[in-house]
Amino acid sequence: MPTPAPATQLHRVLVREELWVAEVASATHSQAIHYVSIVELKDGKMLRDARYYAEPFEAPEWRALWVERMDYYACDPCDFPRIQYRRRA
């Protein structure tokens, strides 16, 4: 039986000409992951796609003064809308 796709929540997308940056949270029942996807386009086609992944963590005490707490990034898979992916024919 195939493993179900993780729940995914898109938080923000920034677009500047042929550069797209997306902030995404993804979760399974056992793990939450946040990632940033940077996509470069050329002539309307994907040229490059880089993704940077991290598990949620508390800022160390020495850095806590400069941290802006973002509780909406909490990853509870039950709160995510399910995104249905379809293969192209």
Image (cartoon, rainbow, N blue to C red):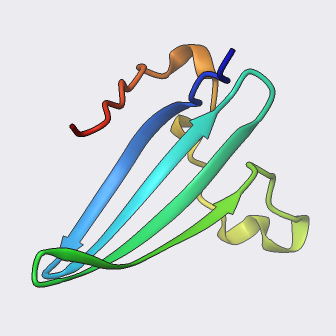
Task: Please tell me which residue lies in front, 12 or 42.
Answer: 42
The residue that appears at 79% across and 52% down in the rendered structure is 57
Percent position of residue 14, x then y: 26, 66
User: Above or below — where is 80 with respect to 54?
Assistant: above
Residue extending farthest to the right is 61
State which quadrant residue 38 falls in: bottom left
Q: The N terminus lies in which quarter of the figure?
A: top right
Task: Please tell me which residue lies in front, 86 or 38.
Answer: 86
State which quadrant residue 59 falls in: bottom right
Q: Is residue 53 visible?
A: yes
Q: The C terminus lies in which quarter of the figure?
A: top left
State which quadrant residue 40 falls in: bottom left
The residue that appears at 71% across and 58% down in the rendered structure is 54
The residue that appears at 36% across and 24% down in the rendered structure is 84
Percent position of residue 56, x then y: 74, 48
Tally of marks:
0
User: Above or below — where is 12 with respect to 75?
Assistant: below
Q: Is residue 74 visible?
A: no
User: Above or below — where is 78 with respect to 63?
Assistant: above
Percent position of residue 42, x then y: 18, 86
Q: Is residue 69 left or right of residue 15?
A: right
Percent position of residue 19, x then y: 26, 79
